[in-house]
Image (cartoon, rainbow, N blue to C red):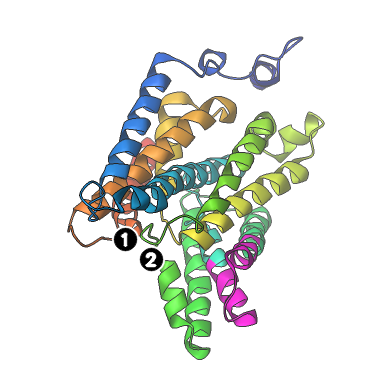
Amino acid sequence: MLKNTIQKMFGAGNSQPLHSNHQKIWTKPFILAVIIVIILGIISMLVGVYDIRGKEDGMDMFFITRIPRTAALMLTGAAMAMSGLVMQLITQNRLVEPTTTGTIEWAGLGLVVVYLLSPAPTLFQRMTGAIIFSFIGTMVFFLFLRRVKLRSSLIVPIIGIMLGAVISAVSTFVGLVFQMSQSVETWFVGSFASIQVGRYEYLWLIVIITVLIFIYADRLTLAGLGEDITTSLGVSYNKIVLIGTALIAVAVGIVAAVIGNLPFLGLIVPNIVSMFRGDDLRSNLPWVCVSGMAALTISDIISRTIIMPFEVPVSLILGTVGAVVFIVILLRRRRLG
């Protein structure tokens, strides 16, 4: 049975991947999903306190703030959803994503270190620090999982959350000692309120990350079957894990530096997509990207309208919804044994 599964994934005399019935991307449901995301993007560009139609500089503000914010929403939603999907495949755990492994907290620590070294760091410097520490933190988590054999998959995210809490406490302590608490507090509140031209362009690097994940999709999917199977097929398991970790670190680091902390997005979207489409990364990736865009855009629209003219941080909406979904997934896994 295992041999048949592997042959279906990589082909026996051909290159037909697993879930071949899902390989056709531009199906009617997917086209409908893309149309929905486009509609949400248009709504996002039209929502806001500033009257872009009644003011003389309305169109200028539209191109300076509304379009960049919508583009940032789409790119960030895709990045966090993809990071969660790749991390779940590598760890073979549905409950793992950047905010349940401490990765995002390590990125925050990287930002704090950058502020220590440079009182007024550029966006590139902040992004570099966040990426480096995201990579270190994710590798620490993966090494822990390889060293310690856990009987229950439910323990894995709990340990990750505990690790993230410790790293977050260290960041807060350093911020208080060196009087950087305002910078730390700003990072913990993920929001798109400050996005405008000149402050989001690094997010376009996420497109490159998406292409790289698609290129390594089959290998990452194979890594999800375990080290023994991956090695027996002549693929370096450690190399694939290292590549996957690097891609996750770059995506999370960019988002952390530009936007801040966005909890549970990488948990909700991949689980919902996998529930309907299985675990093949190559066929699921477009769906995960589109679904991540839609989820974050809807959350941002709610955050801007729920107490208008004021704005609620989008991380509050994601945290509330994500916590409920996280509990539902836990209860569902327990019921299914």
Residue 153 lies left or right of residue 116; in this view the side is left
Residue 91 lies left or right of residue 48; in this view the side is right
In this view, which residue lies farthest toward the front? 56
Q: Is residue 298 visible?
A: yes
Q: Quarter-wise, where is residue 27 in the image?
A: top left
Report the residue at 64% width, 47% height from top: 247
Q: Residues within 10 Å of mark 1 (few under 14, many from 20)?
A: some
Amino acid at dot 1:
Pro
- Residue denoted by label 1: 313
Q: Which mark is residue 180?
A: none
| For the residues bearing labels 2 and 1, Cβ distance under 8 angstroms | yes
Where is 103 relative to 218, above or below? Answer: below
Residue 291 lies left or right of residue 201; in this view the side is left
Whole-percent x, y for residue 142 in the image = 64, 54
Residue 288 vs residue 48, the one in the foreground: 48
- Residue denoted by label 2: 189
Label 2, label 1: how far apart the Cα atoms are:
6 Å
| Most common SS among magenta residues | helix
Instruction: Describe the element under mark 2 as helix, strand or loop.
Output: loop
The magenta stretch spans which residues? 108-131
Instruction: Describe the element under mark 1 as helix, strand or loop.
Output: loop
In this view, which residue lies farthest toward the right? 234
Whole-percent x, y for residue 242 in the image = 72, 48
Amino acid at dot 2:
Val
Residue 273 vs residue 120, the one in the foreground: 120
Which numbered disc flags the more N-terminal residue, 2 or 1?
Answer: 2
